[in-house]
Every structure is written in structure tokens, then in C-alpha cells.
Image (spheres, helix red, strand yellow):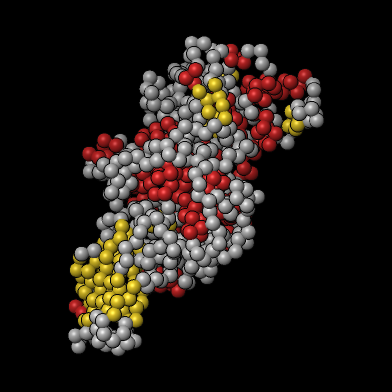
């Protein structure tokens, strides 16, 4: 039975978290004195010169006639981050981080500990605290915050001679997101129970149980993701500028749904670069991670014939059957799945292989991937990097594909996942048709097919070229090359009938049938509970990058102009928008009009589908750029922070971009010119 906490390598050790708060110390003089603007450094409250919100000035007041060497300060801690741990982190004097001097967590009992050097004989009644209007007495007191935001703290100490010393300050209350393996067993169990409730109860049932208006069910989240990414015109949630904002607002929406059940839970993140490190250095396959244990999220592979998740707390989670007559996006069986995923299993599925092969050479995103993203000099490049190399393979590896033969494909097996991405592009462009409805007994015949009517007299070669497929085949196949006449050729088959036949098989067979796809590699990916763990880890990276950019300590600016650096080598990134309103659905030869452009809804001023995250929100939906500003690590109103910015396992590989073990923040980075993608 696994015990917690664990260190950043997933091994049992003493945890330290970014939640740690600082021990602010003030020296007082004889007579009345006001000390303004005293700043301290530490892990969660690190002095920065910029903030999204204007912080009100707080006076630190001393009223006494005692010794000039007298000091009064305090420290805070809780069950997840002790006072001793916070002291140790403060001692590292980390130069870059969040801007709050003290950080506490809502719905966690917090200990406030007074520190002074002048009142050894004082009893508990000599120490008076007024925390957010609540009066408490004692050298140590307990306080529980029940809201996000700044809380005033006034500590007064009266010594036996009647001298009064005061320390007036404030603490910030935010949820702290931690690496899931560092959670205590009780915190992790509470998390899993809260997640299960979302997958078990409908929205109506949950609210009737008293969960509150922010409770939303799994169907809501899957439907929302399908609406954003399974549209025939284009994918609004991926391969575009709104990727980051959509997915992190989405994660926050799910987190707040959990908090409607248990207000003290927060969304942990899964740093899969740790598992990739272990795979490279220690030979431990990522599928052996605690994440995929029988008591957590179930095994990465399934022993079930239909690949249903058959272990863990989410075993045999049912996929909602919405019917084929609804306007909700669904597959031919009326299941809440991608339209091109004709899998008829009634359960959430997972394969961890693509047609029997380990894709991406069996690897998750690595420290090198994260280093590359961190070194981006503008948000457009970093956005694409986070969408692709920093998290994309986790979706593919976990979800997988089966019921598809790629043995005759000219793409090597380890890159077989690209076939599905290319199939989706052909589907959007009208060359692949998927059934709208299938009945029991038609399982073998229920599949997507090539649209022969639309092809007309065009050859397979011509269609592959006009749809842009060759640009990806050239990248992912060692057999395809471009000759001196700008013709794509297959090595060893140049100009032969076999080459022509190979193009035909590739288009009409291999690319026309996507096979069955595990939820995590589809537009219904929120059905797999591991979905909720993977976006926080890239958010944590961007938090660190934005803090670095706003720090006066490191000269590493980040151009945060709204945008997305499209990657022509990514098979998911066609940068096309297909207009299906021009299609005559009664004419099988009628095709959509596709043109280069950004997907509607992804511009900075376009309205997102998110709002109502804070108590001050009016219910109005954020624009995309407003979401980006809201998600700033410097925003007082953002309800969460991350535990730390250490990647010790990356340091071991000499890929140093985070806080070092001794608290050092590198002051010199060699990063690309503006707009250049790191190599």
C-alpha cells in the first residue's frame, strides 16, 4: 500500500511545497514607528515588481517603548505544508516566484505561529490575533479560511510590563495544486472520491444531493470538449491560439465542480516527465507508474476484449448514450464519442498502443520537451509547444488505437498515430465519410469509408496532394521523398504500377478507416479521468515562464501577444477552415469549401465558453484574451497556485530551467530569437 508524501521522483521522502509562506520579521525602535513596504522572499511569496491587480499598501505598525532589538513576526503552516517546511524553503531565499508574502489554503486548518525575542514570560492571552475579523488568543492559533483572496492579519503582543507590539500584515488564500504522488493518502482519496462523483451522478442528481450550483457532471465536460474539437469545420480547442486558455479554464471548471463536493480538494497535476525520466534512466516503463495502479486510475492497458478500463476506481465507466437524433455530437451508435470513432463499447476505453505498436517510441513528454517550451521567447511559439511536444503524446499513448491494420502502411509503426490525425483532416475536407447511424448486428459494416462520389476522376496521388497529406507523409515516412521534378515518390517503386497502387491503398484503405480509438486520443478525452491531471503540468510550466518574464531578476522577456505558431509538420495542424454550409447534403459529390485561416472562436476578442470562476464574476463569459489575463500567475483573483517550480529530475539530465535544489534561479539562458522555435 503506497504511503504519502513522495518526492518529485515519486519516491518516499519529506515533501516541500510551494504553499510555504514566509516568516516576516520587523525590528522596532523606541517610540511609535510606521514601517512601510517591507518585502521578504520565499517559495510561495517571492518578491516581484509586477502584478495583475494593484495590491493595497499594508502598514506594519509597532507601538511600544521596549528595547530597540525587539522583533515580532509569524509563520504559517498546515497539514500539507508544515511550518518547519516553510521555514526551510524561506531559508533558500528563492528570487523569483509568486508575489504574496504569505499563502494559506481554503478549508485547510492553518496554524499561525508568533515569533518574538522579548516575551519569554508571556502567556497565551498576551498574544492577540485578529485574522479576517476573527479574534484569537495564543502564541499559536488555528484559523480556517473559507474563501479565496487576501485576509488581514493583526498580531498584538502585550508583555507583563504593558508594552504592546503589533505586526499588521495580510495573507493570501488560494488552492495549491501539487504533484499527485506528493498528496497524502487521505487527500488523494478525497480527490478520487470527488472525481468519481462527477462520473457517477448527473448534474441534477448532484445538485439535489446538496453539492451546489457549480457541480457539473461528466456528460457536461465531454460534450463541451466534443463541441470544441469535433466540429467538421475545424478544431477550436487544439492547434490554435485558444488551446491553452480553453484547457486550463476547462480544468478549473472541473476543479470547482469537485470543490462543490469537497471544498478542500484541489486539482493535482501529473508530471509525466518524471515517468519519462525513470523510463530512460531506470528502465521503469511509464505504464508502471502509480498513476495507473489498480487503486488509482486503473491500468494503462486493458485485459478486456473491448479495451474497457477494467481496473481502478473508474473501471467500467459508462459512455453516455445520447441517441442519433440529438444535435449533440455523437458516433453512429449514439454514444457520446467523436463522430469518426465508431467504437461501440458502452464503456470508457484505453489501449496504450496504436494498432499493437508502441507509438512515439513508447515515450511520454520529456524534460527536453519542457526545456524547449520554456525557452520560447513568445507565447505563440510556447502555445504550440505545449499543445504538441509537451503534452500531446500523453493523449496518444494512453488512448491508443485498435481494430485497424497498418501493416501495409508506408508510415513506420511507431508513427502510426499520424494516420488517425490525417484521417480527421480528410473527414473535415469531405473525402472520408462516417456513418450517422448503425444498428445491432452491423458492427463489422459500421465503419468510415472513402467518399468515392466526391473523388470523381481524381487519382489517389492528386487527392493526397491537394489535401496536404503529402506534406506529412514526407515527414513521417522514411520511404516517401520528393524527386527533382517535385513529384512525391516511394523508394524502390518510383514510377511503377506498384507505386500507383500503394497510393490507392493508402488513401482508400489505410486513411479512410480510423479504427477504434481510446477516449484519451479522441475528442471525448475528458471521459478518461487522467485527462484532468495532464494540463496542470503545462500550466505550471507557463506559470514559471510568465513569472520569469515579469521578474527583474532574470532578463528573459516573453512576448505575450495573442497568437499561435502553426507547425506544418504536425499532422493535426492543417490550418484549414472548411465551410460545410455550402454542401448540398443530398448531392454526394458536393464538397465543403476549405481555405487557410484561423478557426472561428480562437481570436483574442472572441467570446470563450467560460465564466463565473470567482465570487465577483457576473456570469458574463470571458473573451479569450481575458481568460489569458485571468490565468496569470500574478492575478490575485486566480483561485490556485502551484506547489513549486522544481524539476530535480531534469536537473539530473543537465536540463536546468527551474528552481535548483539550493533555491538558485538561473540568471542566464540562451534562448531563440523572437518567433523562432527552439530546437
User: Nearest the camera: 216 or 679?
Assistant: 679
Image point (48%, 14%), residue name: 585
Q: Is 439 positioned to the left or the right of 614 in the image?
A: right
The percent coordinates of residue 624 (x first, y second) are: 42, 41
The percent coordinates of residue 447 (x first, y second) are: 53, 21
Q: Is 433 positioned to the left or the right of 145 in the image?
A: right
Note whether 204 is above or below 21 in the view shown.
above
Toward the top, the furthest residue is: 586
The percent coordinates of residue 58 (x first, y second) are: 30, 68
The answer to whether residue 7 of the structure is visible from this angle is no
The N terminus lies in which quarter of the figure? bottom left
Note whether 455 is above or below 238 in the view shown.
above
Note whether 182 is above or below 578 in the view shown.
below
Image point (30%, 89%), residue name: 67
The percent coordinates of residue 678 (x first, y second) are: 63, 50
Note whether 648 is above or below 676 in the view shown.
below
Instruction: Indicate the quadrant where residue 451 lies.
Output: top right
Number of numbered markers? 0
Image point (54%, 12%), residue name: 588
Instruction: Indicate the quadrant where residue 28 lies.
Output: bottom left
User: Nearest the camera: 503 or 345?
Assistant: 503
The answer to whether residue 476 of the structure is visible from this angle is yes
Image point (53%, 51%), residue name: 559
User: Nearest the camera: 31 or 83?
Assistant: 31
Amino acid at each position: 500500500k503506497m504511503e504519502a508524501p513522495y518526492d518529485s521522483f515519486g519516491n518516499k521522502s519529506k515533501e516541500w511545497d510551494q504553499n510555504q509562506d514566509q516568516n516576516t520579521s520587523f525590528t522596532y525602535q523606541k517610540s511609535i514607528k510606521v514601517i512601510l513596504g517591507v518585502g521578504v522572499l520565499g517559495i510561495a511569496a517571492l518578491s516581484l515588481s509586477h502584478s495583475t491587480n494593484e495590491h493595497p499598501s499594508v502598514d506594519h505598525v509597532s507601538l511600544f517603548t521596549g528595547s530597540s532589538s525587539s522583533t515580532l513576526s509569524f509563520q504559517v503552516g498546515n497539514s500539507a505544508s508544515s511550518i518547519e517546511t516553510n521555514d526551510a524553503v524561506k531559508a533558500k531565499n528563492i528570487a523569483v516566484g509568486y508575489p504574496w508574502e504569505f499563502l494559506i489554503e481554503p478549508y485547510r486548518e492553518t496554524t499561525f505561529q508568533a515569533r518574538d525575542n522579548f516575551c519569554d514570560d508571556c502567556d497565551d492571552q498576551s498574544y492577540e490575533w485578529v485574522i479576517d475579523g476573527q479574534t484569537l488568543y495564543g502564541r499559536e492559533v488555528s484559523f480556517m479560511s473559507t474563501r479565496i483572496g487576501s485576509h488581514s492579519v493583526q498580531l498584538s503582543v502585550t508583555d507583563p510590563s504593558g508594552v504592546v507590539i503589533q505586526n499588521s500584515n495580510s495573507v493570501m488564500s488560494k488552492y495549491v495544486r501539487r504533484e499527485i504522488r506528493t498528496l497524502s493518502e487521505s487527500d488523494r482519496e478525497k480527490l478520487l472520491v470527488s472525481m468519481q462523483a462527477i462520473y457517477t451522478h448527473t448534474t441534477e442528481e448532484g445538485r439535489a444531493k446538496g453539492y451546489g450550483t457549480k457541480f457539473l457532471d461528466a456528460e457536461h465536460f465531454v460534450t463541451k470538449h466534443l463541441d470544441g474539437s469535433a466540429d467538421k469545420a475545424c478544431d477550436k480547442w487544439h492547434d490554435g491560439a485558444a488551446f491553452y486558455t480553453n484547457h486550463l479554464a476547462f480544468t478549473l471548471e472541473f476543479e470547482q465542480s469537485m470543490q462543490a463536493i469537497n471544498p478542500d480538494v484541489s486539482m493535482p497535476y501529473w508530471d509525466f516527465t518524471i515517468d519519462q525520466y525513470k523510463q530512460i534512466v531506470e528502465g521503469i516503463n511509464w505504464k508502471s507508474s502509480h498513476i495507473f495502479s489498480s487503486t488509482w486510475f486503473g491500468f494503462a492497458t486493458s485485459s478486456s476484449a473491448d479495451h474497457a478500463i477494467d481496473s481502478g476506481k473508474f473501471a467500467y465507466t459508462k459512455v453516455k448514450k445520447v441517441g442519433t437524433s440529438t444535435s449533440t455530437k455523437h458516433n453512429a451508435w449514439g454514444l457520446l464519442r467523436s463522430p469518426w470513432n465508431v467504437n461501440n463499447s458502452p464503456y470508457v476505453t484505453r489501449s496504450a498502443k496504436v494498432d499493437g505498436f508502441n507509438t512515439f517510441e513508447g515515450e511520454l513528454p520529456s524534460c527536453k520537451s519542457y526545456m524547449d517550451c520554456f525557452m520560447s521567447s513568445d507565447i505563440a511559439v510556447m502555445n504550440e509547444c505545449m499543445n504538441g511536444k509537451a503534452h500531446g503524446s500523453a493523449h496518444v499513448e494512453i488512448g491508443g488505437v485498435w481494430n485497424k491494420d497498418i501493416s501495409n502502411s508506408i508510415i513506420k509503426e511507431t508513427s502510426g498515430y499520424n494516420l488517425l490525425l490525417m484521417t480527421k483532416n480528410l473527414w473535415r475536407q469531405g473525402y472520408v465519410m462516417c456513418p450517422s447511424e448503425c444498428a445491432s448486428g452491423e458492427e463489422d459494416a459500421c465503419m468510415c469509408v472513402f467518399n468515392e462520389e466526391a473523388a470523381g476522376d481524381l487519382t489517389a496521388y492528386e487527392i493526397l496532394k491537394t489535401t496536404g497529406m503529402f506534406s506529412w507523409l514526407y515527414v513521417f515516412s522514411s520511404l516517401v521523398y520528393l524527386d527533382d521534378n517535385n513529384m512525391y515518390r516511394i523508394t524502390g517503386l518510383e514510377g511503377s504500377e506498384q507505386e500507383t497502387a500503394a497510393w490507392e491503398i493508402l488513401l482508400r484503405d489505410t486513411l479512410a478507416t480510423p479504427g477504434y480509438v481510446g477516449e484519451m486520443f479522441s475528442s471525448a478525452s475528458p471521459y478518461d479521468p487522467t485527462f484532468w491531471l495532464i494540463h496542470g503540468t503545462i500550466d505550471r510550466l507557463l506559470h514559471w515562464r510568465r513569472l520569469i518574464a515579469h521578474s527583474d531578476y532574470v532578463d528573459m522577456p516573453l512576448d505575450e501577444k495573442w497568437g499561435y505558431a502553426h507547425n506544418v509538420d504536425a499532422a493535426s495542424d492543417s490550418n484549414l477552415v472548411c465551410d460545410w454550409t455550402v454542401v448540398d447534403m443530398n448531392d454526394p459529390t458536393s464538397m465543403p469549401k476549405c481555405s487557410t485561416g484561423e478557426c472561428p472562436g480562437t481570436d483574442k476578442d472572441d467570446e470563450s465558453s467560460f465564466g463565473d470562476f470567482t465570487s465577483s464574476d457576473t456570469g458574463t463569459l470571458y473573451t479569450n484574451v481575458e481568460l489569458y489575463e485571468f490565468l496569470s500567475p500574478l492575478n490575485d483573483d486566480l483561485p490556485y497556485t502551484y506547489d513549486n517550480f522544481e524539476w530535480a529530475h531534469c536537473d539530473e539530465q543537465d536540463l536546468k530551467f527551474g528552481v535548483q535544489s539550493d533555491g538558485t534561479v538561473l540568471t542566464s539562458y540562451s534562448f531563440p530569437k523572437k518567433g523562432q522555435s527552439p530546437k
